[in-house]
Structures are given as structure tokens and as C-alpha cells.
Image (cartoon, rainbow, N blue to C red):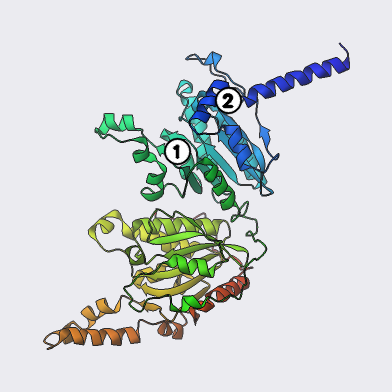
Amino acid sequence: MNNKENAARLLRNLEERRALIQKGGGDEKIAAQHKKGKATARERIARLLDPGTFQEVDAYLVHRHVDFGMETERPPGDSVVVGFGKIDGRMVAVFSQDFTVLGGSFSEAQGQKVAKIMDLALDAGVPIIGLMDSVGARIQEGVYSLAAFSELFWRNTQASGVVPQISVMLGPCAGGSVYSPGLTDFVIMAEGQSHMFITGPKVIETVTGEKVGLDELGGAAVHNQISGVAHFSASDENAALDLTRKLLSYLPSNYAEQTPTLPPSDDPRRMDKELDSLIPADPSEPYDIRTVIERVLDTGSFLETHAGFAQNAVVGFGRMHGLSVGVVANQPMNLAGVLDINASDKIARFVRFCDAFGLPIITFVDTPGFLPGVREEHGGIIRHGAKIVYSYSEATVPKVTVITRKAYGGAYIVMSSKHIRTDMVFAWPSAEIAVMGAEGAVTILYADKLKGQPDAAAAAEAFTKEFRDKFSNPFTAAASGHVDDVIKPSETRPRLIAALELLRDKRLRTRPKKHGNMPL
């Protein structure tokens, strides 16, 4: 056999092996995957990444276990496809679980492959995206599968705050495997086909007697609206992959990279006169804070995260003159914008993410305080509320606050006030900054004077007006320097852009320590 013949033989062998790898679990199982409306692991990667950019790693790796009939089930590449490629020209690392191979079960080999690509991503400083579709641990491998999970969880923790991590749930995720997406920065779920739970419906029925379906237990609606585990819900897996690409456009590739900036497409001096009359005359009347956010940010740039969870708070990403920013706001349309346990957790975690990756934080404040009640107190509102003040106080990124209306008591302090080292604080003329609302203050301060009054209601109304005029306005706070300026609502956009430009090169001022003890 001459050199040409030998080379041809070797190349044929390579092509045959490549073709085998491309088939995953075989034509029959691929057809079954398609019948369920689900793409294969490789099809998903091709859909997510820029065309022609995917470079696979460890395509030929096989597991070493031959017990329980596994000697005949040793497909090359095992149950996951891993590698790297580009999204909008930026490099990312990706792993995609292959449900056509042993249900995508997490094995020692899958763990080795995922660990390798995560290590490469950490060294290169690129985001990590996991496309999840797996029945969970591979039971036949026993402790080897559990050890592989442990290595994954450890790497999720080491990568936290170093590179963005996104979990895209495109199928089942059960048992211990849920802790990996639970450790990542963002979880995106495809409606109708993704489920997450520690124990499945059958186990729950056996142990507790409760009967529950997959969607009721751990579907997209549950985790986006009730548990808060998921940050986004997508109509199908194509929408989930599109959303992943969009989300990445707001994020730097790693903690040391500059905040992403797109060429500005909106006038930085634009003033929206409709904002001047947005706040209702009646302080108890609600309005949608999203209207403020969307009119102040670059047009069409707001991407809300955790939209279905704790809707008395709004968090998300946007752009100001092309610069990516994080936005936090109270939502008067829901529970009057009060802070409760879930809203506290939602705000605190988002602020910490923004701080970890250098995204400036804009905060819009309109809250009457923390939610009162036995349930909240017994649920630990003190501990949860402390997370907000901790996260804002710890954050060293540029922080700019706009007080649109109510800013009462402890809630005023924790919502990125000047007192916890926010760089710039603006207030609208409608801002009310006080220990509590005027009505509540009058019942305490003027209780003796109201006793015996022939027209107590009229007297209370007069005292309320006096209190509001004296304390519940932004000028008292501005006079003390706790508000940097009182501005017209229509001026908000150019004032915020100017503040962010000033703070662009803000330097860190931190005391050396291992880490603080956040109230978890």
C-alpha cells in the first residue's frame, strides 16, 4: 500500500467515525426526538451559534463502565456535545446534552467533557452556555456519576462572577442535576418541554401522597412565577436560543472586560415631555414604572429579567447611549411597590450580578416600605431585606438613583440611597422622602391633638398637608445633600447619561478581606 492509498484509507476511517458521531443515538432516537418537537443536541448548537463557527472537543470520548448491560452502549462522545464557537462574533463555550444517547444521562464521561470545556472557558474568559436535556444521573455508574456532578457544581461555583453562565432548559432536569442551573447566572426555560425538580411526581406521591403533574411541579410557569428559579420563559426552544443570543449582547465576556457598548441609535439629549405628567396627583394611585424605564433608556433596549416573579419589583438590562446598564425599580402597579421577601431576593441577586460584571446600575425608587404582616416577619423579611442593602453597599460599579415618588423609611435607605454610597441621586418634584407616609405619621405625631376635635377628619387632613409640605418633598433632602438635584422628569435621560459618562472610569475603593458574610 503506497502513501496515497494509506492516506485515503485513514481519511475514510475518519469520515466514517465522524458520520457515526453525528448520528448520536441513531436515526430512530433522533426521529423520536423530532416527533416530540425537540431538536437534537447538534441541531441546537447550530441554531445557537454563528454559522460555521462551532469547534467540537472530545468527540470520541467513551465511558469505561460495562456493568448492567453498558458494554453494548458505548457511543463515541457519550451523551453530550461540547465545544466552542461564536455568537455575534464573540467567542462562547457551549455544552449540549444529547437526549438521544441514554436519555442524556449525566455520566463520568459527560462530566469529563463538560469540565474540560468549562476549564477552557475560564482560562479564555468566555461565557459558558449549557443546553440542558437529560434524565439526570446515570444510575448504572453509581458514585462515578455523582462525582462527575460534584466536579460540575464546583466549576459552576468557581466560574461565578468570572464569566457569565447561562442554562437553557430544553427538556427534563431532575434530581441533583438541577443544582447546576441553580448555580448559574440565568436560567431560560422552554414552555411545555422543560421541567426542573429535585424529586419527581411519582416520588412525591409515594412519600407525601400528593398528586401533581410535571408542569404543575416544575414547568416553566412554576419556576418563572412562583419559585423564581428561572429568569426567562420562552414559547419554544428556538425562542429560548434567540433569547440567549439577545441576553449575551448586554453582557461582557468576563468580569475584567469593558461593559459592552453598541453604536448609539438614540438621541442622548432626548427629553420625553409625557414623563412630566406621568405621576398621578393622588399618591395612592398606581402607574407602570416600565413606562418610565422604557422612555428613559435607549428606545427598545429594555430586556426585563425575572418578569413573572415578585412583580412588585422590576429588574433587567438596557442601554443608555449604547452603554449596557442594569435597571432596578419598584413597581407601583403591584402591591404598591412594597418590598417583600421575594422582591428583596430578586433585587439583591440582580445587583450582585451587575456589580460582578461591571454593569452600571440605575435604580428607580417608588416604594412605601417593607410589606407588613406576620407571614413576612416569620418568613425572615429582616434577613431578606438586609440582602438589598448589603448588595448595594458592596457594589462598586457606577450607581445612579432616581426617586420618582415614595421613598419611605428603611426601604428608602436600602434602595440605593446616598447613605449607602450611591454616586448620584436625583429626585423628581413628586418625590416624597420621609420616615413614613404623611397619613401614618399624623396618626402618631398628632394623636393627642386630634382627640376631642369636633371635626377630627378635617383636622387630620390639615395636619397631613402640613406634614407632607414640610417633610414629604425632595427639597428637604436636597437641602441636606442627600439628593444631588431635583429634576424635571423629562430631563431624566440626559441627566443619567451625563452621570454615567462622569462615572465611566470610577475606581474601586475596597478594604482587603476574604469576603463579607452576606445575610443569605
Quick one: label 2 or label 1, which is nearer the N terminus?
2
The answer to whether marks 2 and 1 mark residues whose Cβ atoms lie closer than 8 Å is no
Q: Indicate the amino acid at tag 1.
A: Ser
Residue at 49%, 15% in the rendered image: 67
Coordinates of residue 449 in the picture (x, y in percent): 17, 87
Image height check: is 378 above or below 105? below
Residue 77: x %, y % from top left: 61, 26
Residue depicted at x 38% and y 58%: 311
Mark 2, residue position: 78
Callout 1: 10 Å neighbours few (<14), some, many (20+)?
many
As drawn, the residue found furthest toward the top would be 1
Position of 150 compared to 519: left or right? right
Asked if residue 71 is positioned above or below residue 81 in the image, the reply reads above
Residue in front for this viewpoint, 201 or 185: 201
Label 2, residues with CA under 10 Å away: few <14, some 14-19, many ≥20: many
Element assignment for label 2: loop
Would you place residue 151 above or below residue 373 in this image? above
Residue 140 x %, y %: 47, 20
Residue 513 visible (yes or no)? no
Vertical comparison of 344 with 129: above or below: below
Q: How far apart in space, not on screen, are marks 2 and 1 (Cα)?
A: 22 Å
What is the three-letter code of the residue carrying label 2? Asp
How many discs appear?
Answer: 2
Picture coordinates of residue 283, whole percent (x, y): 33, 76
- Label 1, on which residue? 194
Q: Is residue 57 left or right of residue 275?
A: right
Q: Residue at x 60, y 47 (%)?
A: 127
Please give left or right for residue 234 compared with residue 75 in the image.
Answer: left
**Label annotation for residue 69:** none
Q: Between residues 159 and 335, which one lies in front from this camera angle?
A: 335
Position of 310 with respect to 60 (left or right) is left
